[in-house]
Amino acid sequence: MLQIEIDNGSGFCFGVTTAIKKAEEELAKGTKLYCLGDIVHNSMEVERLTRKGLMTINHEQMRDLHDVKVLLRAHGEPPETYELAKRNNIEIIDATCPVVLALQRRIKSQYEKGYQSINGSLDKEDTITTPPSSSKSGGEASIVIFGKNGHAEVLGLVGQTHSHAIVIEKFEDVKALDFNHDIYLYSQTTKSLDEFHKIIDYIQSHISPTAKFQSFDTICRQVANRMPNISSFAARHDLILFVAGRKSSNGKVLFHECLSVNPNSHQVESADEIDMTWFDGVQTVGICGATSTPKWLMEECRDEILRHTR
């Protein structure tokens, strides 16, 4: 008989759980509630909350709203969003993850000391340079954020520097930095800890003797610790069913880890995408997911498999 195990370590992280709880509490009061962006990168959970009355909007739509309540999800927002809310008399239900909020404050504090950089994209042949900063020490510096360009959390972090921070998405991007200037390195909270350390090592070995380098480990351990846990989980099953929305950055990282350990891994967004031929000759199945994957969705996938294999 086919054995199925759902990974106890998978499912919503603290920040997402809090955001959804706040949304449900407001909706239970009968409040008309908007959410700025998908509350979580999982279409099934977004649809569930939509049925409860949560209305998802983008930044342009928010500009047209007045005298309403808007929930800010766990990813956080740049200062401009709060300024808009104040102008339009919008009540903010702030569900920014405490880890993200602390990171925003650190970057803002560093920026306000005068360590600024130009905003630009990194091309293979480009070197990002920085103009003289307004630092009291008179030096030049770059605030660098290891993260995904355009990701909601990263937009909120870059916003703390008035869009002056440099974003590097992968290890190769670090080679284009100007190592003659001071560098202050931060990371999106859900990025790979191993890759972050690799970037640190590279900067340390290339920074000019006259420049200063500081790195700040801002990766959420609740997320980072899932990597080794999901690796061992994937190794002990014949087949891995990874349940996550395809918009989830965290989901992409964790699914890649599953694949590297167990090539017989498949990603689905919902039970409808499960191919029952995957389970031919399989004795044990492990079901796991991202920090944006609700437990009820993993359970739904388990039930769908059992319904066809009993």
Image (tube, rainbow, N blue to C red):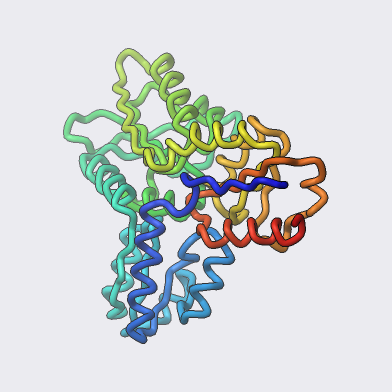
Question: Outermost residue, left direction?
Answer: 136
Residue placed at 53% from the left, 49% from the top? 290
Location of residue 63 by image quarter: bottom left
Residue placed at 77% from the left, 47% from the top? 279
x, y (%) of residue 70? 36, 74
x, y (%) of residue 180? 38, 21
x, y (%) of residue 140? 30, 30
Q: Quick one: quadrant of the C terminus?
A: bottom right
Residue situated in front as seen by the camera: 42 or 57: 42
Drawn side of residue 69 relative to residue 253, left or right: left
Residue placed at 33% from the left, 58% from the top? 96
Residue situated in front as seen by the camera: 37 or 3: 3
Residue situated in front as seen by the camera: 290 or 7: 7
x, y (%) of residue 69? 33, 78
Q: In this view, does 191 lie above or below 4?
A: above
Residue placed at 67% from the left, 33% from the top? 262
